[in-house]
Image (cartoon, grey):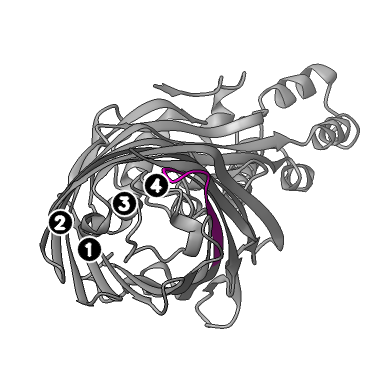
Amino acid sequence: MVNSITKPTHPFIWRYLPAAKKILILGEYVMKKSGLLLLLAGLLTAGNAFAQNSIYRYKTNNRNATESVDAAVYNPAGLVWLQDGFHVEIGNQFGFGTKEIYDGLTGITYEATGGSAFDPTAIFIYKKDKWAGNFAFGASSATGGKMENGSPMLTMGGYRVAMGMAAGVNQALTSPPIGLPGMLVDPFTQDLYGPDGGSLEEGALDLGFLANVAYKVSNGLSFSVGAKYMYRADDFMRGNIMVATNAQAIADFETSLLTDAGLSQEQVDAIIGGVPVVNGDVARVDASYEDNNFWVFSVGANIRPTEKFLIAQTLYFGPTYTAHLELNDLYLIDPALLPQLEELLGMKFEDGAPDERKVVPLYKLGVAYHVTDKFRVEADLHVDFKHIAESNDLNEYAWGLGAEYQVSKKVNWGAGFKYQPIRRSQDDMSDTDFKNDMLWLASGIDVKFTDRLTGVATVELGLATSEYIFYMEDGTTILKSYKDNMNQSGTLGVVYRF
């Protein structure tokens, strides 16, 4: 659905509003492919793209070689190292975080927030002799990002709309049939319009269903295959740009027309009545995606050179899929701009418009060593093959170290860290550098209430060690920067062995 605001009393003024200026209002943020929405989508690393986690995740944050119940999620081939029988895990994950976005052009700092308090998970495992299998379910409802008080893109969009409208009004008032002197009109139009904020939000409700089968070839080798189906119940993006008319400027202009130009009140009312007045949205988008469901497959292998040493590897991959746009509402100041907006963004704003998406291959390596019966160390490596064929965008990776210690017969404590450095060339965006370095600190405890029932509680803190920095073409002047504040995540849950 496309709407437009009511045109003014004198449509000839409206015709002078430059379309080239107005078309800039949504170009920076309307699609998920835009840099800002991708930034917001990554606001909380705690939000799992595959909506599948375990309550043990933050015990050390290095679970790629786990031999516990969470192997169902992080090390499927490791299911064979569990005790025989049924195992059940029930829990919840939560996480919250903020970013500060600095706009070098306006000098304004904005804040983005995101997170969720309720992301439940459930894991069911059966292990018998050399075979093991599991089914798991997880939900993730985290808001990918919310900017309630505007953003650099929204502010600049508001300025551009205001400039375009002011230029159109100026041209209309100084041209026939009105033909007012420029000395009267210019001061008025300079202050006529200004940006008045806006908002931006994107998020999703994901439901993940996971199944794995593992087989132990020998005491030193096991394999697994698995499949995960992601059902995206909701995937939305919405935002708006607001512009306000300066009432004082109109009042001053009315006085000037009466006193300086010597016009009658009737003539002044006719001129003022033809000036477009906007106090609110000048652009708004509310869209979601349908058919945004996909499959992820995995193959894994565990190698145990000795009883104390474990090497685990898992590769995740999946086919491309096509989501379809559901346009709930697209509001433009003039519907005639729609074809230009579609050409600018390279997409069709119509229900059912296709959007091809890829499942990015992910390789996970984990190494664990039992130093003693009570002390275990582990290390992780994650490699996300985002753009193998594109030389201007490097693969993302993360690595970490962790350890677990058996404090007593009932209490096991763990801690670890994960470091995620990202470097990308942004030549295609006229930016010379992109940085995102995060240090994730994690710790957790599990307590055996009985021989069969265990409670688990974990926490993670995300600390930024650098900023996203986008430079102007001179390579030194900051165009914009994004800074992570501390992110907080955690889990609570129980494990029961039948």
- CA separation, marks 2 and 4? 34 Å
Asked whether 450 falls inside the magenta stretch, the response is yes
Asked if disc 4 and disc 1 are in contact, CB closer than 8 Å, the reply is no
Q: Give the range drawn in magenta.
A: 441-453
Query: Please, what secondary structure does the residue beneath circle 1 have?
Result: strand
For disc 4, the marked residue is: 32
Disc 3 to disc 1, C-alpha distance: 11 Å
What is the spatial separation of the Cα atoms under label 1 and label 2, in whole angstroms? Answer: 9 Å
Residue 181 at what x, y percent from top left?
A: 73, 43
Please tell me which residue lies in front, 294 or 478: 294
* Front: mark 3 or 4: 3
Which residue is outermost to the left? Answer: 217
Q: Mark 2 points at which residue?
A: 224
Q: Which circle marks residue 314 in the picture?
A: 1
Which mark is first along the chain, 4 or 2? 4
**Residue 75 place in picture, x, y as percent:** 28, 59
Q: Residue 73 carries which label?
A: 3
Report if residue 303 lies within the magenta region: no
Q: Which amino acid does label 3 sit on?
A: Val
Q: How crowded is mark 3: few (under 14 residues within 10 Å), some or many (20 or more)?
A: many
Mark 1 or 2 closer to N-term? 2
